[in-house]
Image (spheres, rainbow, N blue to C red):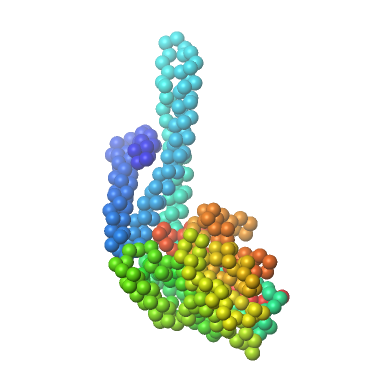
Amino acid sequence: MDWYVFAGLQTFTSNWRSIRRQRIISWGYLIVSVGVTIVFIIGFGSFSTAKGMTPYHEWILSIFLTFLITKLVFILVLFLGDTGRFFYGIINNISKPKKGAVKPYFPARRKFITEAAILVAAIPFSGFVYAMIKGKYDYRVHRQTIYFNDLPEAFDGFTITQLSDIHSGSFDNTAAVQRGIDLAQSQKSDLFVFTGDLVNNAAWEIEPYISNFSTLRAPFGQFSILGNHDYGDYIHWDSDAEKAANLDKLKEHHKALGYRLLLDENIELEKNGQKISLIGVQNWGRGFIQIGDLDKALNGVDKDAFKILLSHDPTHWEEKVRYHPANIHLTLAGHTHGAQFGVETDSFRWSPVQYKYLDWAGLINEKKRYLYVNRGFGFLAFSGRLGIWPEVTVITLKKA
């Protein structure tokens, strides 16, 4: 791949007067690209000893992917041009040449094809760079008003701020993270909820940010659940006891943050003598850890109560919640991150994650059972976001 790009760049610079500049462009590219690949290979050699993916690993992965995708786009355009040259050469050789004329089998590669390849490849390259430098901390507020016939009157206009998928082990800019926290707190909602994946793998990842996230406060409290990454399933532990201790430590960190961690249980929120039930389950996801027990979490909840469920993975709602005999009015989830890449406009939405998840972002309604999927506050693996920006959700409950 690098050699093919190298050849294309030589065509691009072929008529430059300065031989030195020609070599700087073509050979400079080759050295940088191969260097990025070598750093990627060496860097991920230390992954198994790092207790998970660190910002360092995410940066070298992201830079490698940026070069890889850019090269693929460049090669695709160049290859289309070369394919045209190939068939043009065949046609010319089949036809009889004029007497004394010598026809080349392949005509020379035209410079404008290489220019077009560079122009088109610049689009993903600049997009990835923006995603890594700016996009991953470009927090957006998504507001959603949902109407219910049986919402208790005291809770008409009740507001909920939701964060999900903080992935604190990926952060590399504390000041930028604080801007997102301040944005969430400035919503001044009645209730704050966090729907899982506080860390990438290890409890210590949230420790540098406890003082930051503990500033999130709401009059009716702060509540949280665990996500699939919080159980430490994706890295090696020396023993089961070490892994269990990590989870216990993470639960303590929820307490230090001021969050009431709901582990297959429920609590009642009361306002002006009326109540709603807030329910939280451990992770249950298709293809992921499935230990959340919805029936246990509903124990003691009145069947006619207005119910809000915190469940990290939206596939739990798809496969269990929406069919459950208990009428769970609203489920708040996260998990998908919207793939951290996609396009969202008023009339069009696309992300590669939609080929894996039926419900991957925003509000879903099925027979008055609602699901809201938060796009995530943090990021994982790819150290960036493009098109699917980090989200602070504000939901307003209204009586129909």
Residue 251 in view: yes
Residue drawn at x 38%, y 67% as measured from the top left: 232
Q: Classify residue 210 by image quadrant.
A: bottom left
Residue drawn at x 58%, y 56% as measured from the top left: 349
How many marks on residues? 0
Q: Classify residue 395 by image quadrant.
A: bottom right
Decide which of 190, 235 is in the foreground and name it. Answer: 235
Note whether 320 is above or below 79 in the view shown. Answer: below
Decide which of 274, 88 is in the foreground and name it. Answer: 274
Residue drawn at x 42%, y 30% as measured from the top left: 109
Note whether 153 is above or below 63 in the view shown. Answer: below
Point out residue 391 in the picture as x, y percentages from the top left corner: 51, 67
Point out residue 357 in the picture as x, y percentages from the top left corner: 54, 58
Point out residue 222 in the picture as x, y percentages from the top left corner: 50, 80
Residue drawn at x 62%, y 87% as measured from the top left: 271
Point out residue 188 in the picture as x, y percentages from the top left corner: 55, 80
Q: Quadrant of the image for the C terminus?
A: bottom right
Residue 132 in view: no
Q: Quadrant of the image for the N terminus?
A: top left
Decide which of 208, 52 is in the foreground and name it. Answer: 52
Horizontal arrangement in the rendering, residue 150 relative to residue 133 (left or right): right
